[in-house]
Image: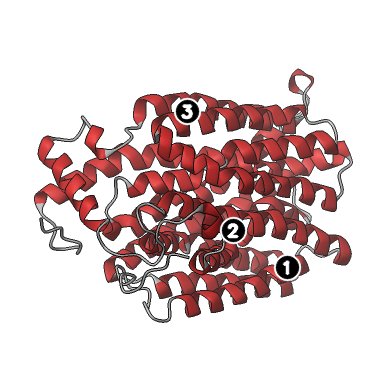
Amino acid sequence: MQVSSGFNDKSDIERQTIRKVVWRLVPFLMVCYLLAFIDRGNVGMASLQMNHDLGMSAKVFGFGSSLFFISYFFCEVPSNLALQKYGARVWIARIMVTWGIVSASTALVHDATTFYILRFLLGAAEAGFFPGVLLYLSYWIPASYRARIVATFMVAIPAASFIGSPISALLLQMDGIGGLRGWHWLFLLEGIPTVLLGITCLFMLTNKPEDAKWLKDDERKWLVDALANETRAPKKILDMPLTKLFRNRYVLCLALVDTCASAAGSTLSVWQPQLLKSFGLSVMQTGLLNSIPYLVASVLMVYWGRRSDRVKERRWHTVVPMLLIGLGLFATSLSGSLVPTIFMLCAVLVGAYSFKGPFWALATDMLSNSAVAAGLATINAIANLLGGGLMVNVYGWVKEATGSYALALMPLAVLTLISVATLLLLTRNGRGQSGRYANKTETA
């Protein structure tokens, strides 16, 4: 069966099948991911009140925030393997219900210790959601569509801060209602919807195309055949024991590259509200201005993912956003006024999120069908541990030592340069073209 991959040579059956799959799965998963990042990142806005109430220093807050990524690291690969075994419908529902309960329970925090415990539990609860969705989409979306679909799905990340920051700022204004502080209401009212949406997963998601009764017989056959054809191409990373996967040079290099964007996005989600508020803004002004870089990133990351698919190129579509991250971080660290800082933060977040569609399409192309579940989870777990667990802490340490929110961005800028060099070396033979990773295989 001939499966087209260009933009202008698609058959009618291909167009209508992809359209049905995208509209059935992607908007719903985007909303799920939107809530994931609201629940993960709302601690940044909550800190504007919570840190004072609990007497937490920048170092304590940074350490507590980083515990999310440490438990995430240890639980991510087992969670993704469980999704592969039990199916996305049940497992994604389980993930969402548990993280929604833990997120809402953060309203019960009363000291640094309980903050540490609940951030650790939140990471364990949410672990596996993102690589699980990537794995799930690989069951449904042919490779030639993945960069744009992944970029569209991941719009939920910047959209979470664009939507979540003003909402969180408004919830903080509920201070005193029912005897609760504003940050208590923030965690409660942003955690409960996740539980309800998690239950909805049981009715919305279908595990595999073979089970999709909402596709016609010819549509289902086309999709199953198209995906089966892709699994026959040799890959750089084949199936291997988990211990070897964590030592595989391609996996480790991809994880380091992803650390760049993960560190930029995670650190800014936690610290950007405090950076902006340091310019003398009110809580509401901080919430509104904090949302601007995420709005810009939401628009441009979809364009960049579509462009990567259209020209069938991954390498430079991943490198250019990384360079933008580095440039933005260096410039922000030197900026001393509000408006240039916002422009530079826009550059950082546009780079961090435009990176994701081409990068995850590139990573998925390099993994064999049998290694994709553990491979994606391993890459994401390591990147989150280093980018979130380590770099969020580093930011807090440098801020405490220098007193400058801007100078604390310098370690991130250095990390970005290392990640760019790593990706250029990793893809120097394949050149990052879609489907160009079939010339070599790696088993150890």
Q: Is residue 265 visible?
A: no
**Where 170 sits versus 403, above or below?**
above
Nearest to N terminus: mark 2 or mark 1: 1
Image mark for residue 197: 3
Depth order, front residue of 185/209: 209
Depth order, front residue of 271/32: 32
User: Residue 223's spot in the image, x, y percent?
Assistant: 20, 46
Is the residue under label 3 in contact with that under label 2 (CB below 8 Å)? no
Depth order, front residue of 381/45: 381
Q: Residues within 10 Å of mark 2 (few under 14, many from 20)?
A: many
Q: CA distance from mark 3 to mark 1?
A: 41 Å
Q: Is residue 397 visible?
A: yes
Indicate the quadrant where residue 230 lies.
bottom left
User: Residue 357's spot in the image, x, y percent?
Assistant: 42, 59
Q: CA distance from mark 2 to mark 1?
A: 31 Å
Q: CA distance from mark 2 to mark 3?
A: 27 Å
In the displayed structure, does residue 309 sit left or right of residue 134?
Answer: left
Number of labels in the image equals 3
Is the residue under label 1 in contact with that under label 3 (CB below 8 Å)? no
- SS label for mark 2: helix
- Name the residue type under label 2: Ala
In the displayed structure, does residue 18 sit left or right of residue 105?
Answer: left
**Where 54 sits versus 351, above or below?**
above
Residue for badge 1: 337
Image mark for residue 383: 2
Residue at 47 percent of width and 42 percent of height? 81
Task: Please tell me whether mark 2 or mark 1 is closer to you in this view.
Answer: 2
Quadrant location of the N terminus in the rendered image: bottom left
- Name the residue type under label 1: Ser
- Name the residue type under label 3: Leu
